[in-house]
Amino acid sequence: MLSIRDEGTGISPEIIDRLGTPFLTTKEQGTGLGLAVCYGIAARHDASIDVVTNSQGTTFLVKFKLKSFDLN
């Protein structure tokens, strides 16, 4: 698991369910593609991204599936 956390004001409930939607942005200069690209990369690697947010900040949890390898 990879955990990335900020200490901002959190993500509003109106936005949280739409995270990863292309061109969704809350910034004046944003393109809204950053998280969409991240969600796509995670999906290609059979990973998932969960979000935990509150007024103290937001944490993105990138969860990778554990794979076994044959070392022989």
Image (spheres, rainbow, N blue to C red):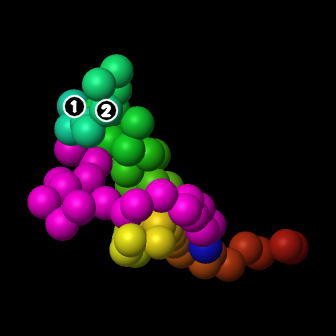
Alpha carbon of mark 2 to alpha carbon of mark 1: how far?
11 Å
Q: Residue 5: horizontal and vertical position, in percent? A: 57, 64
Identify the residue position indicated by label 2 in the image: 27
Identify the residue position indicated by label 1 in the image: 23
Quadrant position of the C terminus in the picture: bottom right
Q: Amino acid at mark 2?
A: Lys
Q: Residue 25: horizontal and vertical position, in percent? A: 25, 36
Residue under the image location 76 percent in, 75 percent down: 70
Please tell me how crowded label 1 is: few (under 14), some (14-19), or many (20+) other residues with Cα within 10 Å.
Answer: few
30 to 21, vertically: above or below? above
Quadrant position of the N terminus in the picture: bottom right
Bounds of the magenta segment:
2-22
Q: Amino acid at mark 1?
A: Phe
Label drawn at residue 68: none
The residue at the far left in this view is: 14
Relative side of 34 to 66, left or right: left
